[in-house]
Amino acid sequence: MKITLFSIITGLKIAVVFLFIVIWPGPFNLFPYLINEYVWSAGIEESAFVKIFDITSAIVLFWIVYILVRRFLKKIINQQQNG
């Protein structure tokens, strides 16, 4: 339970910091603008697409960090119990 909670908190911290960094216009937002121009040139607004892209990136980052931290902590605890 503690491992899962710590993994969720760590993932949320990193994802929120990432989201606050990329939500403002900057170099990271050039990539979604290029995707929007290439794929949906006459479709969704650029600003809406960039926000959706940023939020989706933050969610993916959360899951990656959550899985990595959880596996790492479980491995450390198993090594301490066995060794």
Image (cartoon, helix red, strand yellow):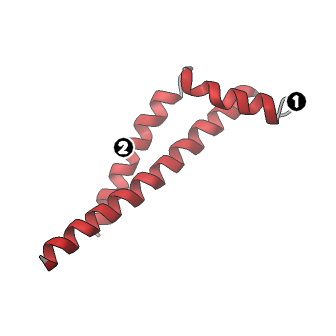
**Which badge, 2 or 1, comes first in the chain's sequence?**
2
Q: Amino acid at mark 1?
A: Ala
Residue 34 relative to residue 70: left or right: right
Residue 17 figure quarter: top left
Please, which residue is most extreme toward the left here?
83
Please, which residue is most extreme toward the bottom here?
82
Say if residue 44 shows up in the picture: no
Tell me if residue 77 comes above or below residue 19 in the rendering: below
Q: Which residue is mark 2?
A: 13
Which residue is painted at 70% across and 32% down in the image?
48
Q: Which mark is residue 75?
A: none
**SS label for mark 2:** helix
Please, which residue is most extreme toward the front here?
83
> Label 2 vs label 1: CA separation?
36 Å
Measured as percent of width and height from the top left, residue 51 is found at 63, 33
Q: Which residue is mark 1?
A: 42
